[in-house]
Image: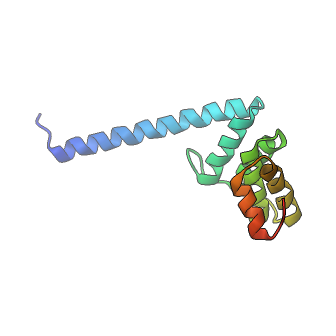
Amino acid sequence: MKRTKRQLATCLALTIALFTFASHADTISDYRKAAEQGDAAAQYNLGLCYCNGEGVEKNMSEAGKWYRKAAEQGDAYAQCYLGLCYGKGHGVEKDRPEAVKWLRKAAWKGHKEAQEALKSMGVDY
């Protein structure tokens, strides 16, 4: 059976979409296993997945939960993003003092985004 270029392109697009979906599912599963075992980087990455809806349904409460676990272990990226969540009330109740607390922890470690966020809030770090 001879296939047209359009049919081949459609088949290729579907194959890529299925591969990407499977890759996200595998990645999420791997992150979750490692995160549940206490891996801070995996906890942060799982939080990012929930924040952006990558491979999972977007859920800011779940994002905040995983950011907090990683932040409590000292992950500067998670501290920054948890601070931003508190600053905007995304997935957690809006709480400026809590936002400043977490953003400062990240800023003290040299995290530029946290430093900029504090500066925009008029707060020294």
31 left or right of 18 in image: right
Residue 3 left/right relative to 73: left
The image quadrant of residue 4 is top left
Quadrant location of the C terminus in the rendered image: bottom right
Looking at the picture, tell me which residue is in the foreground, 51 or 80: 80
Q: Is 9 positioned to the left or the right of 29 in the image?
A: left
Give the camera-side residue of 14 and 119: 119
Image quadrant containing the N terminus: top left
Residue at screen point 11% across, 36% down: 2
Residue 28 location, x and y as percent? 60, 37
Where is 107 relative to 44, above or below? below
Vertical order, 66 against 122 (above or below): above
Q: Is residue 78 left or right of residue 31?
A: right
Q: Residue at x 78, y 50 (%)?
A: 106
> Can see residue 58?
no
Q: Residue at x 20, y 44 (%)?
A: 7
Q: In front: 122, or 47?
A: 122
